[in-house]
Every structure is written in structure tokens, then in C-alpha cells.
Image: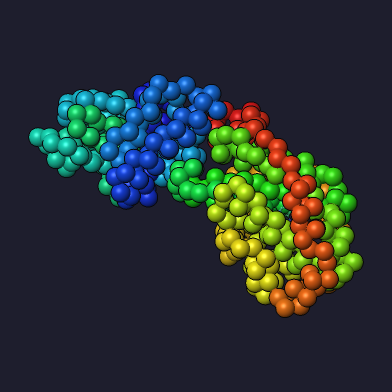
């Protein structure tokens, strides 16, 4: 239970970071996207709220639900949130409200500090707020003031005629509001890494279009189901349905495996990138995101990545390039995809050689590809693409509202 859980609140104060440094026009657009995304997240979690108000560098969500804070903190673009009580910005009103809020928290000789800030014109300074309110609390409770490392901090933020009082600052997920950047094709394998990579692009404001290459008969049927359930979880973060594209890739793997067994993985990835780049153009997307991490497996050596990259003529983003596996796993757990990626494993890809090349050469790869009916294979795979509309899954909504799981 949070510190604020027992208090009566009327709003959630929302802080955002990078949006604040944009030009007025861009900032206004980003802010209204953020407001819409906050409203969607709260509605999805069935958390009642009255209205969402923009106020010069802050957003205020009017609600009496403390749990709203946790959900809003998980909306991309939010830097931090505080459940607040709103009062008149007079010293007298602040004193009374501060006492009411802090007294129950100052048990067993706990120390406290008042952190005050102010914007607007008033006949007192921020320092005055600290002194007047601090003295009143000291007198009424006997609790000592300690400015460094106090047991309890009470924040008072005065904005024009209102004073917002709170005891908690909850970290937000950060990033930019989803939908403020372009579209990106997210190559989703169903493994642990690629959902994290897609999520990181969403965090930077990109709309993702997930694409799954079905490798049956070289993997089990479960791969497709796993990709579907991961997209349901990502759709929860997106706050709207996502269209998942599924491409048949088995026939391509058959060809690569019989032509050059040790190079199959690199040829496979080049084909995926080639088709993803075509889909990107069709869908007016500006790039591809993958979950590759340097040196993680044979196909992800820098030499192989160089050779794979050349198959796509759009930018390939690899937000996990420099993360260790343990770091990706930690993130996957936090975003709620880890248990989906590790459930019902469809088995390793049987097209993979025991000793795959780690040193692919672009010249040799192109020569190999010339031996294949590459255009026909690409066209057949592209034609096999089927789109599936995937809705946010209610039972995964705990990622957005931990206090109201299921
Ligand atoms: P994951 O990211 O799922 O953990 P992985 O670590 O098993 O994948 P690779 O198989 O080398 O790594 O794949 C590297 C990247 O290529 C993946 O992160 C993903 O973006 C993309 N990818 C791999 N297989 C597929 C697939 N079947 N469909 C779509 N994208 C794929
Ligand atoms: Mg990986």
C-alpha cells in the first residue's frame, strides 16, 4: 500500500519531461496526445475519473482513486506522478491541510521536511511556506524537522490560486507519448527479446506494426500462438488494437537449408528483413525494429549483422544491441511479456545448423542468393501475409494497474 493510500485525494498531478522543451506548437500536440493516452489507460483499467486538465507544464487528472497514479505512471511520456489534495493557496489553508495529511504519518518520533515550490504572484515566498507550515506541524505533533533524509516529506506546489499537497512522487515510465512518432515494423519472434525491443520503440512514441514469420514445419505450431499472446500484451501498453502480420517462412527456410546449411540463419534473417522492408513501404512505416543484441547468438555477431542489414533499405533499430540477456529479461518481466515468451516453447528452429557461420560475407551471400529463385520466394512469402487485429487483453492489464489486477 502506498503512503497516500489512506489519504483523501482529489487529483493526480502528472509531470512530463522532454515534451516541455518542444516548441509551443509541437508541445501542444504532444500534450493532447498524452492526455488522450492517459484517458484511454484509465478507461481500460476501469478507474473512474472526472476530467484531465492541461496546466502549463503539468497535467491534472481529477479523480479520488489513488490507484490511478500507478496506471498514469505507466503511460508513455509520463516522468512522474503524485496523488494530491488541492487547496486554496493561502498560508492558513495550506497549514490546515498539511497538518491533516501529515499528522497520521508522523508516528514514533518520525522526522519531517516541507518541500515547497511556487509559480504565480503571491505575498509569500516558497521559504515562507516551509517556515509557516513546518512550525505549525512541529507545534501540533512534536515531530522534529530534518531537512536531509527526513522520514516523511510533505510537498506543497503552489500554482496561482491553488496549492497541491502530497507526500509521494511515483516514477513514470518516461519516453514520449505513443503516436507522436512514426510507424515501425516490429519483428516479433515470440522470444524474450523482440517484445522488449518493440516496447522500447513504443516508449519513444512510435506506433508499432508487429510482424511474425511462421517457420512451421521447422518450429512447432505454438510459435504463432505465442506471438499472438505477446501482441495482446503489447496492445495493453498501446491502449488500442494492434494489427499483427503473419508471413509463411517455412518454404524459404527449406531452400536455405538445402543450399547452405551453415549459412541458413543469415539467409533467413536477410529474407525477413527484405520482406519487412517491403511491408514497411506498404504501410508507410519508417523502419524495422528487432530484438538483436550484439554477440548474443551466432547470427548476431557484428559481422553477421552487417551482412543482414544490407537486405533492408530502411533503417533497422536494435534497442537491445548493447543490453545483456539478464537486462532484457528484467525488462521483459517488468513489461509483462516474459511469462508469455517462456510459456509453451515451440522448440528451437530445426533449420538451424549445429555450427552456424558467425562470419558471413556479403559477397558470398549474394552469390548464394543468386542460386535461388529469390524474387519468386519473396513474392510468395509477401503474398502469404495475413493481418490479424489483436485487441488489448483484459487479463494482462495488471501491467497498467497492479493494484487492480485481473
Ligand atoms: P528473440 O528476440 O525473440 O529473443 P532470438 O534471441 O531468438 O529472438 P534470433 O532468432 O537471432 O534471436 O532473432 C533475432 C531477431 O530477429 C529477433 O529479436 C526478432 O526481432 C527477429 N526474428 C527472429 N525470428 C523471427 C520470427 N520468426 N518472426 C519475426 N521476427 C523474428
Ligand atoms: Mg535474442
Q: Is residue 348 left or right of residue 239?
A: right
Where is ligand 1, by quadrant? bottom right
With respect to residue 218, does 171 lie above or below?
above
Q: Is residue 145 left or right of residue 78?
A: left
Residue 264, picture quadrant:
bottom right
With respect to residue 95, does 128 lie above or below?
below
Q: Let me know if residue 326 appears in the view.
A: yes
With respect to residue 187, does 241 lie above or below?
above
Q: Is residue 277 left or right of residue 72?
A: right
Expressed as whole percent of the image width and height from the top left, the position of residue 348 reads: 83, 56
- What residue is shown at x 61% (from left), y 56% (from top)? 288
Q: Let me know if residue 166 appears in the view.
A: no
Expressed as whole percent of the image width and height from the top left, the position of residue 140 reads: 24, 28
Q: Nearer the viewer, residue 126 or 102?
A: 126
Q: Nearer the viewer, residue 180 or 191?
A: 180
Expressed as whole percent of the image width and height from the top left, the position of residue 224 reads: 78, 44
- What residue is shown at x 87% (from left), y 60% (from top)? 254
What's the colour scheme? rainbow
Residue 106, picture quadrant:
top left
- What residue is shown at x 68% (from left), y 71% (from top)? 307
Count of numbered circles on the image: 0
Q: Is residue 18 left or right of residue 248?
A: left
| Quarter of the image that includes the C terminus | top right
Residue 110, picture quadrant:
top left
- What residue is shown at x 44% (from left), y 32% (from top)? 36
Amino acid at each position: 500500500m502506498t503512503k497516500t493510500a489512506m489519504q483523501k485525494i482529489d487529483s493526480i498531478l502528472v509531470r512530463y519531461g522532454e515534451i516541455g522543451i518542444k516548441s509551443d506548437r509541437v508541445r501542444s500536440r504532444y500534450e493532447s496526445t498524452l492526455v488522450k493516452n492517459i484517458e484511454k489507460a484509465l478507461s481500460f483499467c476501469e478507474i473512474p475519473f472526472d476530467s484531465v486538465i492541461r496546466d502549463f507544464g503539468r497535467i491534472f487528472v481529477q479523480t479520488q482513486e489513488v490507484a490511478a497514479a500507478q496506471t498514469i505512471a505507466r503511460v508513455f511520456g509520463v516522468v512522474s506522478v503524485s496523488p494530491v489534495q488541492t487547496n486554496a493557496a493561502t498560508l492558513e489553508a495550506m497549514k490546515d491541510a498539511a497538518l491533516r495529511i501529515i499528522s497520521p504519518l508522523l508516528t514514533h518520533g518520525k522526522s519531517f521536511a516541507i518541500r515547497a515550490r511556487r509559480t504565480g504572484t503571491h505575498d509569500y515566498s516558497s521559504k515562507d511556506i516551509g517556515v509557516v507550515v513546518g512550525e505549525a506541524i512541529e507545534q501540533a505533533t512534536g515531530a522534529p524537522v530534518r531537512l536531509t533524509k527526513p522520514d516523511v516529506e510533505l510537498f506543497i506546489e503552489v500554482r496561482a490560486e491553488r496549492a497541491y499537497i502530497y507526500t509521494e512522487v511515483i516514477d513514470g515510465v518516461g519516453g514520449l507519448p505513443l503516436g507522436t512518432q512514426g510507424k515501425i515494423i516490429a519483428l516479433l519472434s515470440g522470444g524474450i527479446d523482440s517484445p522488449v525491443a518493440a516496447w522500447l520503440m513504443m516508449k519513444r512514441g512510435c506506433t508499432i506494426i508487429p510482424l511474425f514469420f511462421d517457420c512451421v514445419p521447422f518450429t512447432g505450431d505454438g510459435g504463432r500462438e505465442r506471438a499472438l499472446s505477446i501482441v495482446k500484451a503489447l496492445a495493453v501498453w498501446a491502449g488500442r488494437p494492434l494489427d499483427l502480420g503473419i508471413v509463411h517462412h517455412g518454404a524459404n527456410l527449406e531452400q536455405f537449408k538445402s543450399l547452405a546449411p551453415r549459412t541458413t540463419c543469415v539467409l533467413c534473417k536477410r529474407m525477413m528483413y527484405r520482406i519487412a522492408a517491403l511491408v514497411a513501404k506498404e504501410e508507410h512505416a519508417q523502419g524495422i525494429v528487432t530484438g538483436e543484441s550484439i554477440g548474443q547468438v551466432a547470427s548476431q555477431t557484428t559481422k553477421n549483422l552487417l551482412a543482414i542489414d544490407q537486405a533492408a533499405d530502411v533503417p533497422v533499430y536494435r534497442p537491445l544491441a548493447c543490453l545483456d540477456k539478464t537486462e532484457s529479461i528484467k525488462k521483459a518481466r517488468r513489461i509483462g511479456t516474459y511469462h508469455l515468451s517462456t510459456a509453451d516453447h515451440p522448440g528451437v528452429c530445426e533449420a538451424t545448423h549445429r555450427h552456424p557461420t558467425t562470419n558471413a560475407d556479403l559477397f558470398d551471400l549474394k552469390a548464394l542468393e543468386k542460386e535461388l529463385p529469390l524474387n519468386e520466394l519473396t513474392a510468395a512469402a509477401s503474398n502469404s501475409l495475413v493481418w490479424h487485429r489483436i485487441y488489448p487483453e483484459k487479463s494482462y492489464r495488471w501491467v497498467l494497474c497492479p493494484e487492480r489486477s485481473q
